[in-house]
Image: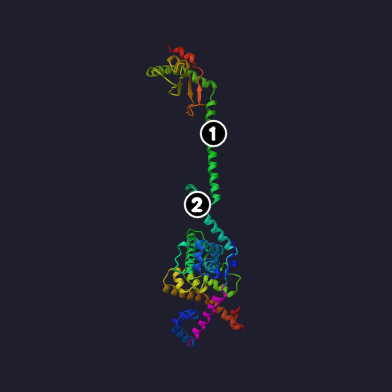
Amino acid sequence: MPTSEHEPNGKWQADDKELLARVKVGDTTAFSVLVDRYKVRLFNLIYRMLRNREEAEDILQETFLRVFKEKESYDPTFAFSTWIYTIALNLCRNELKRKKRFKFFGIDLVKDDRRYAVEGIENRNCLSSTLEKAIASLPVKYRTVFLLREVNQLSYEEMSQSLSIPLGTVKSRVNRARLMLREKLKPKFEEQYELSKSSPIPIWLF
Amino acid sequence: MNCRKVRRYLFGYFRQELSPEERERVKAHLDNCAKCAKEAKEIERINLLLKDDLETFVPSVDFNKKLLAKIQTLSSEVTVRDTRNWWVRLLHEVFPSVRLRWALAGAVSVIIVAWAVMFSQRQTSIRQEYLSQNDTERENQTLVSSQDIADSLHQEMLNRVAQTSIIRNKAFIIDNFSFSASKGEDGRIRPEDLYKRFVIERRSPLTRQRGRGNHYVLPVVSTQQVSQKIDY
């Protein structure tokens, strides 16, 4: 399988729908271009939803497998990105539900929020790890919209389509999530503010 | 615009989500309100952190390779599945892993072997039980009964023969005894031949099987004796 780097430039510039059309004909290199285009964004989203590397990779793989399997049923009136985000988010949601169900039966797959948030966030610089923890501690509903908006930089319209919820709801949810995050970060910021008063250079630069 | 409302707009303010007039109004408020200006500064920092400081996670290096391998097995599976028997497909659905199918095959063969062993042991134990009976005991049994049996057989035989004129390779079974007759030289069986040739067999009382290997010839009742008793 030749890697996509050896492909002519045209394939890189082709838009998602063209690539998908080529995948439908059986062009696997077009598929790997699509995979390269989306895997990092999706992985960041999924990883921050599940906070577990292996699971996140499984879900990511499953997402692309679904894309490949369901390629015929893709509706070209929607953007490809919307479609793939919908698939990934549904898989995430199912995974979280499954874990919750296991938890109900006494098998604790999800760690409680605090330990959960800490996993994999250590050994980073202080503020961004605080930020990660704060994001991880948001309720799933709000975490989803927050990540889509602030990390994946989706527009409100795209989010509304991906999640199939009304635009207004998306906006209010994003705002609510932001304020929740702000509340969570407040103590940390105040602590740093106190420190920075005694320090000649602003400490948050580090 | 009051402080409460401004604070709800602040994130949007830094993310360029507001309409021009909203923007203006927020800006105007921030110029006049020190508390909101401080809050705005922190939200700007959060925005900057989110934009620049978040770690980018990358899936493992061999992600593409694994994915493409999976897709290849997926498409080959589809073609294979159509050619397989329905029961093979069902088996593969119910036991998706190869290991599980081997385990199943192992379990089935173990059951078959165990059954065979148990069956043969039962058979030998039956035989041994029969053979372990005292020889004399067995003989007594047959001796005592043989005369009566011969008598009753005689009677029964006469009845049957009276009903049928020609008997070809017929075997009669009375109680636990069977006696058979074979054809005479002319292809017919006369009553005399019948009595000369019949053999009294005893079916094994334990296995109750008919056929080869399970017949016991009573030694006492000879064809001679029986034929003497029958007077034609």
Q: Position of residue A123 (x, y in %)?
A: 61, 70
Give me the C-alpha separation between circle 2 and circle 1: 41 Å
Front-lying residue, B106 or A41? A41
Tell whether position A14 is magenta.
Answer: no
Mark 1 element type: helix
Give the residue at x 43% y 21%: B168
Front-lying residue, A138 or A145? A145
Label 1 Cα crowd, 10 Å radius (few <14 / some 14-19 / many 20+)? few
- Magenta span main SS: helix
Residue B93 in sight in this render? no
Label 2 Cα crowd, 10 Å radius (few <14 / some 14-19 / many 20+)? few
Q: Is residue B159 above or below residue A162?
A: above
Q: Which residues are magenta?
A: B32-54
Q: Position of residue B182 (x, y in %)?
A: 46, 19
User: Which residue is under mark 1?
Assistant: B120
Residue type at numbered disc 2:
Arg
Q: Position of residue B10 (x, y in %)?
A: 48, 80
Residue B38 marker: none
Residue type at numbered disc 1:
Ser
Q: Could you tell me which chain the residue with mark 1 belongs to? A: B
Q: How is the image coloured?
A: rainbow
Residue B48 in sight in this render? yes
User: Quick one: quadrant of the N terminus of chain A?
Assistant: bottom right
User: Which residue is under mark 2?
Assistant: B81
Q: Could you tell me which chain the residue with mark 2 belongs to? A: B
Q: Are marks 2 and 1 on the same chain?
A: yes
Front-lying residue, B202 or A195? B202
Q: Is residue A9 above or below residue B8?
A: above
